[in-house]
């Protein structure tokens, strides 16, 4: 893809009046909707004939049991990572959004409500 061997990940946080935004952007390979659909179909997460937009396919990574790994290791392949991330974000009434372009990279935005504790420090 004519990229350097070293990738770039940018993490930024901004605090607004009522929310905290966390943006994570990389210049990696992006997510491939065809590969995600294949893995989701093989694992029975979706039906082969199910009609989904690319965005809906990308969001399948948040489903319990989803993984694109063919082998389970100590640290990957069990399909619990992104499911847990989404569950924890939603527990505090937050939201997570993904935009990705195969071959160009991925951007993840996490929106968390801003709560103030008694000392008026931000707690998310």
Image (tube, rainbow, N blue to C red):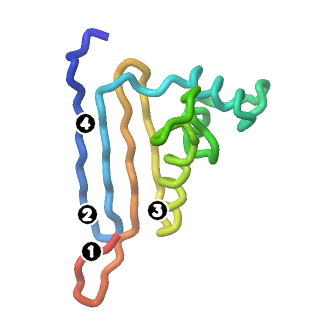
Whole-Å distance between the Cαs marked 1 and 4?
Answer: 25 Å
Helix, strand or loop at label 2? It is: strand
Give the label on residue 122, or none: 1
- Left or right, 42 with respect to 83, comes to right
Determine the residue positioned at 28% across, 90% down: 118
Say which of marks 1 and 2 sits in front: 1
Residue 38 appears at what percent x and percent y?
65, 23
Pick out the residue farthest to the bottom: 118
Residue 81 appears at what percent x and percent y?
50, 47
As drawn, 102 above or below 24: above
Whole-Å distance between the Cαs marked 4 and 2?
Answer: 20 Å
The residue at which mark 2 appears reads as 15
Determine the residue positioned at 63% across, 47% down: 64
Helix, strand or loop at label 1? It is: strand
In depth, the one of 54 and 80 nearer the eye is: 80
Determine the residue positioned at 57% across, 22% down: 35
């Amino acid at each position: 893809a004519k990229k350097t061997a070293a990738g770039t990940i940018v993490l930024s946080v901004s605090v607004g009046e009522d929310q905290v935004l966390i943006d994570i952007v990389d210049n990696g390979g992006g997510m491939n909707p065809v590969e995600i659909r294949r893995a989701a179909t093989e694992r029975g997460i979706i039906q082969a004939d199910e009609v989904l937009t690319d965005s809906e396919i990308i969001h399948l990574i948040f489903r319990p049991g989803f993984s694109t790994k063919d082998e389970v290791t100590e640290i990957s392949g069990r399909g619990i990572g992104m499911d847990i991330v989404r569950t924890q974000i939603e527990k505090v009434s937050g939201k997570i959004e993904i935009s990705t372009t195969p071959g160009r990279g991925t951007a993840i935005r996490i929106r968390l409500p801003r709560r103030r504790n008694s000392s008026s420090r931000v707690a998310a």
